[in-house]
Image: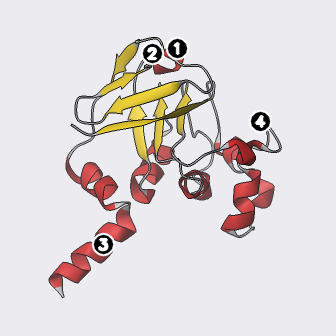
Amino acid sequence: MATVNGRVRKFEDNIDTDTITPGNILHLPMEELKQHVFSPVSADYYKTIQPGDIIVAGHNFGCGSSREQATAVVKELGIAYIVCESMARIYFRNCIALGVYPIMSPGASGIFSEGDPISIDLDGGKVVNPKTKESTQFEPLSGTPKEILDSGGILPLIKKIAKASA
């Protein structure tokens, strides 16, 4: 059983890609871009993120534009899982392609507060708040999306396939 543990970084509904990576900074290199992640929420938000943190959000996470930077910057900061009530389709696709595991778990945002511990059973499809013992379910990914995620994203998978066929 694959279980992931981390610290919750809590967001509400309708967190759009402009909140994650404001449009006026998209030209910056990744190292500078990271310093502006979620800046509409807090100018120094990036300073509070620790590798292994897990985003927990409400409905419609990642809505807005299809900018890949909004997913890439999250991954670059060490966030590998996003648990939410629902996610914009393009953001979901970008998560898979870049190796960030998207988890849609109805009710999840209601059982966590900022900074809570979180435990995710990736095989069993269960999200747990160890502090309160509350939990929600989700449908684990399988097939090609899981293969892409297990490889770290679409590019690492393509490199792996190319290397195996060489």
Tell me, yes or no, whether the two marked residues, 4 and 2, touch with CB atoms within 8 Å. Answer: no
Q: Is residue 25 above or below residue 22?
A: below
- Return the residue found at the far left: 165
Query: Which quarter shows the C terminus?
Result: bottom left
Query: According to the image, label 4 marks what residue?
Result: 41
Q: CA distance from mark 4 to mark 2?
A: 23 Å
Give SS at disc 1: helix
Query: According to the image, label 3 marks what residue?
Result: 158
Tell me, yes or no, whether the two marked residues, 4 and 1, touch with CB atoms within 8 Å. Answer: no
Q: Picture coordinates of residue 116 (x, y %)?
A: 55, 24
Give SS at disc 4: loop
Give SS at disc 3: helix
Please tell me how many numbered marks the rendered image carries: 4
Q: Residue at x 45, y 15 (%)?
A: 107
Dot 4 or dot 2: first in sequence order is 4
Query: According to the image, label 1 marks what residue?
Result: 110
Q: CA distance from mark 2 to mark 3?
A: 35 Å
55 vs 91, nearest the viewer? 55
Point out which mark residue 107 bears.
Answer: 2
Disc 1 packing (10 Å; few <14; some 14–19; many ≥20): some
Disc 2 packing (10 Å; few <14; some 14–19; many ≥20): some
Dot 4 or dot 1: first in sequence order is 4
Q: CA distance from mark 1 to mark 3?
A: 38 Å
Q: Residue at x 46, y 32 (%)?
A: 83
Residue 26 in view, yes or no: no
